[in-house]
Amino acid sequence: MIRRATALVAALSLGALAAYAEGAIATDGLKASPTAVSIGTVTADKDGYVVVHRTDFTGTLPGSVIGHAPVKAGSNAEVSVPLDKQQEAGTRLIVMLHEEGDGDTDFDAADKPVRTNGTPVQETVTVE
């Protein structure tokens, strides 16, 4: 019986670590104004960036990068991403988590999107 309990605790602990390692962008507190995107909580396994993309013409796929802000490994509260250019109300944006890829602490092409089950960690938000 003790082995089963120990195995269950170990499995739950590993599950919690796996969930943490995947990264997350909380939708609670996610808002976009014409000049910035605010995120209540971003969880990252490694140092990286929250990157804001314009969407493509369908409104569902990421297009050009219009802003980014650094995040540290762990939980990051109240992250604000200034946008390079003012956006119109109603514009859909994709907020995506990227991992620092080359250790230079500058967002660049080496900093790839964080993926969970092959899918980028991202959320969509509409400019208010």
Image (cartoon, rainbow, N blue to C red):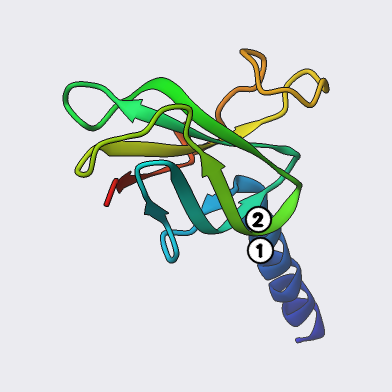
SS for dot 2: helix
Circle 1 residue: 16
How crowded pointer 1 is (Cα within 10 Å; few <14, some 14-19, many 20+) is rated as few
Q: Nearer the viewer, mark 1 or mark 2?
A: 2
Frontmost residue, 86 versus 78: 86
- Tell me if residue 119 comes above or below residue 8 in the rendering: above
Left or right: where does residue 9 sit relative to residue 62? right
Which residue matches tag 2? 20
Which of the numbered marks, if any, corresponds to residue 44? none
Q: Would residue 34 appear left or right of 10 to someone viewing this image?
A: left
Residue 75 or residue 127, whichever sits in front: 127
Q: Determine which quarter of the picture holds residue 63.
A: top left
Residue 58 percent across, percent down from the top left = 16, 26
Q: Quadrant of residue 68?
A: top right
Q: CA distance from mark 1 to mark 2?
A: 6 Å
- Residue at 62%, 38% in the rendered image: 69
Could you tell me if the residues under marks 1 and 2 are in contact, i.e. CB atoms within 8 Å? yes
Q: Is residue 35 above or below residue 11?
A: above
Which residue shows up at 41% across the image and 28% down it? 85
Give the residue type that dot 2 points to. Answer: Tyr
Q: Residue furthest toward the top?
A: 109
Look at the image and tell me in which quarter the N terminus lies.
bottom right
Going 42% across and 57% down the picture, which residue do you hit? 30
Residue 127 % position (x, y): 29, 46
**Seen in the image, is 31 located left or right of residue 107?**
left
Q: Secondary structure at mark 1?
A: helix
Q: Nearer the viewer, residue 14 or 77?
A: 77
